[in-house]
Every structure is written in C-alpha cells, then in structure tokens.
Image (cartoon, helix red, strand yellow):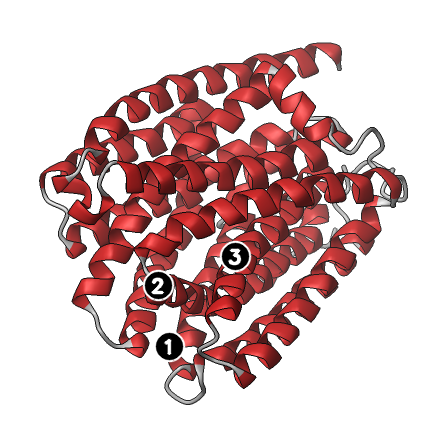
Amino acid sequence: MLTEQSGSPRLWLRRFVNVRPDEVAALLASFAMFFALLSAYYVIRPVRDEIGVALGKDSLHQLFTIVFFVMLALVPLFGFIAARFPRRYVLPAIYAFFVANLVAFWLVLRAAPEHHAALGTFFVWGSVFNLFVVSLFWSLMSELWSHDAAKRLYGFISAGGTAGALAGPLITQGLVRIFAPVDLMLVSAVLLLAAMIASLLLRRIKPPEATGGETEPAGGGILDGAIKVFTTPMFARIALFIFIANVIGTFFYLEQARLVATSISSNADRVLFFSGRDLVVSIVTFLIEVFGTARILKRFGVTAALLALPVTGAIGVLMLSFDAALGIVAAVMVAERIVAFALANPAIKLIYTLASPDEKYKVQNFIDTVVFRGGDAASGWLYALLGGGLGFAGGAMGAVAVPLAAAWLWIAQRLGADHKRRASEIVTRA
C-alpha cells in the first residue's frame, strides 16, 4: 500500500490544517486566489488612505455617504447579473471589469495627479472595489465548500488573504520609494488578474463535496438579497452585526485620519504609516488563522468567535474616550482588525455555508456592500455631528459608541444561537 512520504507537501500541510487528501488541491487554489486578491487591494489601500487624509476629514464623511449611495445603485445591477447569468461567469467578468478600472485610473491620475475630483472618485471606487471583490470571493467559497469543510478550512483560506494583506504593504513599501504611488495601480491590476485566473482554476478542480449548478444563474429577483435581509431574522442579525461593527470601526478610522493629518506632514510618510500598520495586522492575523482559528471555532464555537469582536470594540471605545492619542488609536485599530479578520469574519462566512445558493450570492453581497458602507456613512455623519474636530476624547463619540457596543454584544450572542439552530435543522433534515 502506497503512503505519502514524510516530507511531502501534502503531509506537511496536514500538520497545520485538518484537510483531507482529496481537498488539498482546491484548498491551495482557494488560498492562492485570496492571496492574490488581498495583495491587489492592500497594494493600493495605503494610497487610498493617504488620499483620504489629503482630502481632509470634512470630506471623508461626505465621501462615505457617496460610497453608500453608489452601493445602493450597484446592488440591483449585481442582482440583475446574478439572476440572469451562470454563476461561473459572474465573478470573472466583474474582476475583469475592475482590472480595466485600475488601468483607467492609472492613466487619469498619471496625467492629473492633483485633480481633486479624480482623487475623490478613486477613494469612492476603492471603497466599492474592495467590498465587491471580497464578497464575491466568499460567495464562491460558500458555494464550493460544505459547512463541515468550512469549519475545518476557512481559517487556512483566510490566512491566504492575510498573507496577501501582508505582501501588499511590503510591495507598497518597497515600490513607493522607487515609483510614484499612482503606479501601484498597475501592480494591483496584475494581482487582481491573477486572482481571476485562480478562480477559473478552482472551478475546474472544485472540492469533492461541491454541488453542481454552477452553469445556472442564481435566479430570483434583483432585490432578493435586500428583501431576505429584512425578512429573515438570522440575516437581519448578520446585517446588524456588520452595521454596528462599521459604525464603531469608522469612528476609529476618522479619528485616526484627523490625528495623522495633524501629526504627519509628508505624503510618503503617511503611506508608510498606513502600510506599516497593515503589516502588523497581517502578521498577527496570519499566525492566528493558521494555528488558532479552526481550533477556536471547534472548541469554543461560532458564538465565542463572534463575541470577541464587540468585546474588543468596547474596550477600544473606553480607551479612546479617555485618551485619543495617535498611538492609542492605531493600537485599537490594529487589535480590532486582527480579531475581525481572524475570528469574526470566518465565523460569519461559516454561517453563510448554511444558506441556499441564491442567498450565498445575493444576501451576502447586499450585506457586504450596502450594509457595510451604510455603517461607514452613518458613522461619518455621526462623527461630524458629535464634534469630530474635537476628537474622540473631547467630543461625544464615546457616549454614543458605548451603548452601540452593548447592543453589538447582544446581537453577537443571538447570531451564534441562530447558527447553532440552523446547523441542527440541516443535520436533522439530512
């Protein structure tokens, strides 16, 4: 009987993740796709953040509002595409569209680097782009991987994205000293194209438990995702969880932008600051995802993974209410993003594996785009109305954020119960 050699790549991989031999190829393709995808985004993320600082905090909350309405306009269009075209073509076509966008932005900003409208448009586009491409990735994952496989493998797949988020800032830090920041858009375009190619490969070598139907459209109406969010308690709680997470997270983001603008004067130094922060987040998150996420989900369950994020957010809110120095804000954002990426996000994506095919695309896309950016927009206006110029500690943000954090904790607990109940129902029906 043939056995794997002790030094074989497959056996080495199985030391870190509970993967079956017939799942290895699809797992590595998923890892590679997410790596290329987040590398593409994180190469240009510091550029987007620096543009946000340059435009000023007074413009940021207006831009987040524009992003929200752009999302509202795009969701019916996405619903139309998903309802009428085979699922296997939806993701590659949208990724190719965004690749073309990056090349177009490079041409425009190369010719007019200080054009205010072009800079604002790119900030809005970047805020739309990252959510759509990542949401489509996870829709593909929830379509191809079963609930059991997702519980075992989503931590490792998420680590692919985190490795990409680690590579992106390193690429940025290396190239920004040689090329103009706008030239990084071409690097991002190449990486996004690689992610699209990986998605096509993954469709060919899909996991053994993947169901058919990829040649069929998702079906239904163009607004099904929004309707199901408002009529299905579990999806409504996911939406509220994401919405509150973004309201509080955007408080942190806007406060950071205000402090960076007053503390760091050089554009290049700002890009280095943002990429350095992302680097720390990526290293720690990667280690947790490879060695801890699957174990935490197995031992403590989805509820504990969900609760970790609002607990971290509540601690951050209390810290910033007393002292909102740049170092403290950066530390709070680092901790919040590590917990979100390593624990809360995989838990949410695990819940989606229990959804129907149309829900995996339409509901997930609506929550990941409109609801996500709705939290940004609401937070931006709250920040401005509550005295954002005074800062977190000097304004009234803490008084609003504390009860929001308490509601967030309650929703996380209820959402964990929803997952447990739906998982039990599926097992009973099987």
Residue 293, position as x, y percentages in the image: 44, 40
Residue 289, position as x, y percentages in the image: 44, 47
From the viewer's perspective, is the residue at label 1 or at label 3 nearer?
3
State the residue in front, 305 or 399.
399
Q: Is residue 231 above or below residue 342?
A: above
Q: Which residue is mark 1?
A: 173
Q: Secondary structure at mark 3?
A: helix
Q: Which residue is mark 2?
A: 279
Q: Bin the neighbour count of mark 2 within 10 Å (Cα to Cα): few under 14, some 14-19, many 20 and up.
A: many
Query: Which residue in the rendered view is the most extreme toward the left?
Result: 322
Residue at 44% from the left image edge and 64% from the top image edge = 48
Residue 238, position as x, y percentages in the image: 52, 26
From the viewer's perspective, is the residue at label 2 or at label 3 nearer?
3
Real-space Cα separation, disc 2 to disc 1, in angstroms: 10 Å
Answer with the quarter of the image where residue 327 lies.
bottom left
Q: Which residue is mark 3?
A: 124
Q: Is tag 2's residue or tag 3's residue first in the polypeptide sequence?
A: 3
Using the image, tell me which numbered label, if any, was put on residue 319. none
Q: Bin the neighbour count of mark 1 within 10 Å (Cα to Cα): few under 14, some 14-19, many 20 and up.
A: some
Residue at 73% from the left image edge and 30% from the top image edge = 223
Type of amino acid at the residue the image marks with label 1:
Gln
**Can residue 70 be seen?**
yes
Q: Is tag 1's residue or tag 3's residue first in the polypeptide sequence?
A: 3
Q: Bin the neighbour count of mark 3 within 10 Å (Cα to Cα): few under 14, some 14-19, many 20 and up.
A: many
Q: Is residue 364 above or below residue 138?
A: above
Real-space Cα separation, disc 1 to disc 3, in angstroms: 23 Å
Residue 183, position as x, y percentages in the image: 52, 81
Q: Is tag 2's residue or tag 1's residue first in the polypeptide sequence?
A: 1
